[in-house]
Image: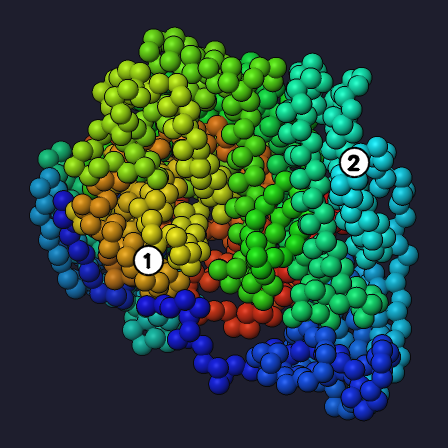
């Protein structure tokens, strides 16, 4: 299978983006959710039609007087590069169509910006937010073999659990090339996870997309149990193409569940600077 | 494209060369014999010794400035202070932080046992050094120089470590024939010379020689008994039948000769060690090093570095004695599952049969002493009693080609050799022919009557190895090619085949199977070594291991003549970290290999042979032929990866607080790092192999040799041998 080449403006590469996933989105037009944030323009849109998957990626830029970040980063997004408003924020959105359903993705460089946009989405009752069932994904990840004919290979390279029964420890993170094959997981955590005594609330999925020439595109998707997703955009945005394939796979594995609250309100690291 | 030695990259006009510290007889007052106190001191910078233009006999050693803005003595009257610190690396780290400018700009370092040198007109700087150093030096030698002539030499040293001479005595051997006595006399003489010096200069190594004497004593006891086999044999000969020992003259002679040969090997190693480790120790001018390029100060630090690496590896293996596990435990343990339908197999449960499951129930064994030395002739080699490194490592050890990390590969060969020997040792009371017959019958019963369980884990592992040999008849191996248009046809004659078990899986006759095993022994060993090397010494990092071994293979002439084998080896190494069916693993391994070659071909792997490899792995006609030997060998990869790769040993080898892992977007595996800044640091390096790996990784990014290769090599040696552990003891202390 030929994997399409995705290239967008280099302004937005080599950094992390938060994103959310929705279905049954009545109105995909992003500007309709930015009324209290700023004005948006569409920079570019690219459409891709593959055998079992069609998707488009749209790059928008919203200009706002609200500082959603701080320091040097704020200076970079400031139009006049002096840290003063107005600020230009790059956003992505996807529309992903497969036989099963249509999914939408909105991606933001800063969680606080995303929080405000998603608040508007929820207020407009537009679309159903989705989260990944992390425990289910981990159980599947242990058993599932990547199929030869699939262009996307995934495996779990990290997960986080909260411990509640032992008063001496509050959480545990495992990371590495293949933590689900580790002795620690197998001997100490697996049975507790399978019996829901310990519940993983975050995981990192490594994705590798192979085309017919066996060129590989990689992405690591961080996800939590609340519906937050995060990924690192590589140089020239080449790995954006992994997202629709990944979401299609998660959908086929029936890992999605619906949520009604704004997942970005649970992210603590970026504060509201209003 | 790179040429060997990167000749295109060397611009000799820009090379300033190293500093040479040289002594030679005073030309103005020729005197015979020359007195030590009338030697002339010269310090000269040049790329070669020849360029120095010395016309008289001289002794020289390269020395390296501690600071870039070093100060050389302005007059011909000054003092040179030579310090022998156990932990010179940390001392220099401390001085870098707290030493005065005046002091640090006059400091130099070497790979001799006197590894720190202060050259100054001001004696107070020596006092400052001693005051600020975190520990005291074991010895100091001061040369006071007037008009470039040594006028006075002062030596001070700590008291030698006391030892009981009886621990270094051998049992009585005077009844042996003169030629045997002479060999043992040589050993006695070597020990008599070495041990007092070791107690003085490197007392931490006394234990090595104690253990060596114990081992040689065991050999001597056996020789003495076999010369006149009366009474009970020593316990070390328990594996032999008592009656056979007394009556079989051929067996007696065989053991006698083997033991004498071992003592000869030890003597040879000792003569290297004696000159290399201790020449250049205080008093420096007493003895010159036989490695002439370092004839003044010797290579004591380089020897200690090699020793520390070998010792840390040997300690890790001794704490998890796989030999005892195979010999004592596996014969009573349940067989490996998933082997009922060979050549198909299911290794999903093999991890629970890992040797680690006995980790807490097996007592550590004593570590075996290994004598370290450098050899131009032997290069990197490991034997029962010694570990040698290439001579080129002395000046180029900080490069990928000559890194001391190569010694780890050699030590693993010894480990695997023991392992494979033990797997087929069987009942010690039976003759080899009888044992082979039994193994063959057991194997045929198992593969023909599917569903019959193996007797024990040891039996199931033998079954795997023999099944692999059978599979190579039709599938090929690292060294066995199947005709390209006749894949999976038998390479045996019809009269050599006992029967066809399943399609493309033949059972050869007994003699032929053992012949095949002997032919495939080296391939089996290489696969075992590669998988263990990957996990133990390269932190399971494919992205580091593959480019490094290809870099070393690119320099070896015979590799070019057999690229198929080395490409197959690479694919099998990668397959250890790739799940799936054989076909999936083959495709993904090939993909990974292409990716790694592509990533490095313009940098560290820019060699003609690598460009050829790239062409081959993109040529469908070539790589498709590799699938069958690859799939036949996968069972060995999975056996090592799941059963013989010990997490305990790996943990022991990497157990260093400075070891860490970094996740990087875009990589297919986490990155390894050793969190120690460049340069001299007052930190303890507990696992020198783990440290060396980190220092080699950046070299993969560059075509160039490291700047100041020789100075960087000296720094690495100092770092490797200055590893005080958390309790303040030297790693390797009992």
Q: Residue at x 60, y 28 (%)?
A: B323
Q: Are marks 1 and 2 on the same chain?
A: yes
In front here: B516 or B450? B516
Judging by the rendered image, the residue that carries numbered circle 2 is B177
State the residue position of label 1. B610
Mark 1, Cα crowd under 10 Å, few <14 / some 14-19 / many 20+, is many
Compared with B471, B148 (above or below) is: below
Write the residue at 53% across / 49% down.
B660
Subunit ID for the residue under disc 2: B
Q: Is residue B241 above or below residue B702?
A: above
Mark sitting earlier along the chain (1/2) = 2
CB within 8 Å, label 1 to label 2 = no
Distance in Å between CA atoms under marks 1 and 2: 56 Å
Is B407 left, or right, of B606 in this rendering? Answer: right
Q: Quadrant of residue B109?
A: bottom right
Where residue B75 appears, as percent x and y from the top left, is: 77, 91
Residue B150 in the image: state x and y as whole percent. Answer: 84, 82
- Residue B436, image x, y percentages: 48, 18
The quadrant of the image that shows the C terminus of chain A is bottom left
> Relative to residue B603, is residue B46 depicted above or below?
below
The answer to whether any part of residue B78 appears in the image is no
**Closer to the eye: label 1 or 2:** 2
Please say which color scheme the image uses.
Answer: rainbow
């Amino acid at each position: 299978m030929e994997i399409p080449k995705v290239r967008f403006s280099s302004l937005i590469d080599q950094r992390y983006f938060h994103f959310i996933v929705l279905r049954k989105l009545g109105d995909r037009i992003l500007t309709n959710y930015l009324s209290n944030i700023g004005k948006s323009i569409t920079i570019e849109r690219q459409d891709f039609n593959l055998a079992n998957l069609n998707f488009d990626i749209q790059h928008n830029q919203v200009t706002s007087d609200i500082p959603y970040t701080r320091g040097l980063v704020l200076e970079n997004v400031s139009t006049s590069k002096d840290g003063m408003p107005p600020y230009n924020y790059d956003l992505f959105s996807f529309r992903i169509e497969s036989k099963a359903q249509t999914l939408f993705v909105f991606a933001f460089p800063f969680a606080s910006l995303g929080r405000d946009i998603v608040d508007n989405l929820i207020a407009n009752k537009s679309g159903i937010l989705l989260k990944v069932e992390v425990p289910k994904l981990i159980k599947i990840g242990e058993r599932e073999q990547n199929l030869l004919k699939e262009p996307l290979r995934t495996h779990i390279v990290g997960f986080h659990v909260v411990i509640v029964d032992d008063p001496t420890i509050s959480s545990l993170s495992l990371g590495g090339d293949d933590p689900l094959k580790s002795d620690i997981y197998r001997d100490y955590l697996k049975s507790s996870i399978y019996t829901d005594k310990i519940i993983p609330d975050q995981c990192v999925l490594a994705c590798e997309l192979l085309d017919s020439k066996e060129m590989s595109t990689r992405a690591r998707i961080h996800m939590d149990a609340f519906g937050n997703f995060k990924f690192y955009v590589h140089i020239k945005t080449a790995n954006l193409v992994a997202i629709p394939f990944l979401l299609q796979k998660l959908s086929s594995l029936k890992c999605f569940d619906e949520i009604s609250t704004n997942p970005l309100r649970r992210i603590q690291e970026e504060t509201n600077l209003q | 494209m790179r040429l060997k030695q990167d000749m295109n990259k060397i611009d000799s006009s820009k090379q300033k060369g190293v500093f040479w510290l040289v002594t030679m007889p005073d030309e103005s007052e020729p005197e015979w014999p020359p007195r030590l106190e009338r030697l002339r001191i010269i310090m000269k910078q040049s790329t070669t010794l020849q360029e120095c233009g010395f016309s008289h006999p001289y002794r020289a050693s390269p020395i390296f400035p501690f600071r870039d803005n070093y100060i050389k003595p302005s007059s011909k009257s000054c003092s040179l202070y030579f310090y022998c610190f156990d932990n010179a690396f940390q001392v220099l780290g401390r001085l870098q932080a707290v030493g005065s400018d005046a002091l640090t700009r006059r400091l130099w370092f070497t790979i001799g046992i006197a590894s720190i040198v202060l050259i100054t007109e001001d004696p107070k700087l020596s006092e400052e050094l001693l005051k600020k150093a975190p520990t005291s030096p074991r010895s100091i030698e001061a040369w006071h120089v007037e008009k470039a002539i040594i006028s006075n030499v002062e030596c001070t040293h700590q008291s030698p470590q006391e030892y009981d001479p009886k621990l270094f005595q051998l049992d009585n051997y005077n009844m042996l024939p003169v030629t045997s006595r002479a060999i043992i006399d040589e050993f006695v003489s070597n020990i008599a010379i070495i041990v007092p010096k070791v107690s003085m200069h490197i007392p931490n190594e006394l234990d090595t020689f104690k253990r060596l004497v114990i081992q040689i004593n065991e050999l001597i006891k056996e020789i003495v008994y076999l010369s006149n086999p009366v009474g009970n044999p020593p316990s070390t000969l328990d594996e032999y039948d008592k009656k056979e020992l007394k009556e079989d003259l051929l067996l007696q002679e065989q053991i006698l000769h083997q033991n004498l040969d071992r003592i000869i090997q030890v003597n040879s190693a000792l003569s290297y060690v004696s000159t290399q480790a201790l020449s250049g120790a205080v008093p420096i001018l007493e003895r010159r090093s036989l490695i002439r390029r370092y004839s003044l100060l010797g290579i004591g630090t380089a020897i200690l570095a090699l020793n520390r690496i070998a010792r840390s590896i040997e300690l890790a293996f001794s704490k998890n004695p796989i030999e005892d596990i195979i010999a004592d435990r596996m014969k009573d343990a349940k067989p490996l599952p998933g082997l009922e339908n060979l050549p198909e197999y299911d290794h999903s449960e093999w991890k629970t049969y890992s040797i680690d499951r006995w980790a807490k129930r097996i007592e550590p064994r004593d570590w075996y002493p290994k004598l370290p030395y450098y050899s131009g002739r032997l290069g990197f080699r490991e034997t029962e009693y010694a570990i040698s490194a290439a001579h080129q490592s002395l000046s180029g050890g900080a490069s990928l080609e000559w890194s001391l990390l190569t010694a780890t590969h050699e030590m693993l060969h010894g480990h695997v050799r023991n392992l494979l020997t033990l797997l087929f040792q069987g009942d010690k009371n039976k003759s080899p022919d009888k044992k082979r017959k039994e193994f063959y019958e057991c194997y045929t019963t198992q593969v023909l009557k599917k569903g019959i369980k193996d007797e024990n884990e040891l039996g199931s592992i033998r079954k795997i190895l023999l099944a692999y040999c059978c599979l190579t008849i039709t599938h090929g191996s690292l060294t066995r090619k199947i005709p390209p248009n006749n894949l999976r046809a038998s390479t045996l004659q019809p009269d050599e085949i006992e029967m066809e078990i399943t399609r493309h899986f033949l059972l050869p006759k007994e003699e032929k199977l053992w012949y095949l095993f002997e032919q495939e022994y080296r391939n089996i060993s290489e696969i075992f070594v590669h998988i263990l090397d990957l996990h133990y010494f390269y932190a399971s990092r494919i992205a580091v291991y593959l480019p490094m071994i290809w870099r070393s293979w690119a320099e070896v002439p015979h590799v070019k003549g057999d690229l198929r084998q080395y490409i197959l080896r690479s694919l099998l190494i990668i397959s250890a970290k790739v799940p799936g069916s054989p076909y999936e693993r083959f495709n993904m391994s090939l993909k990974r290999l292409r990716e790694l070659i592509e990533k490095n071909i313009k940098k560290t792997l820019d060699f003609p042979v690598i460009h050829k490899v790239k062409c081959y792995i993109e040529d469908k006609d070539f790589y498709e032929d590799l699938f069958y030997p690859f799939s036949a060998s996968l069972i060995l990869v999975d056996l090592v990866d799941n059963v013989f790769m010990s997490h305990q040993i790996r943990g022991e080898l990497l157990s260093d607080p400075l070891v860490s892992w970094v996740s990087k977007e875009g990589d297919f595996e986490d990155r390894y790092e050793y969190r120690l800044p460049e340069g001299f640091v007052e930190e303890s390096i507990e696992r020198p192999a783990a440290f060396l790996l980190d220092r080699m990784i950046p070299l993969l990014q560059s075509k160039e040799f490291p700047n100041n290769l020789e100075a960087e090599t000296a720094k690495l040696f100092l770092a490797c041998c200055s590893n005080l552990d958390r309790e303040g003891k030297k790693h390797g202390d009992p």
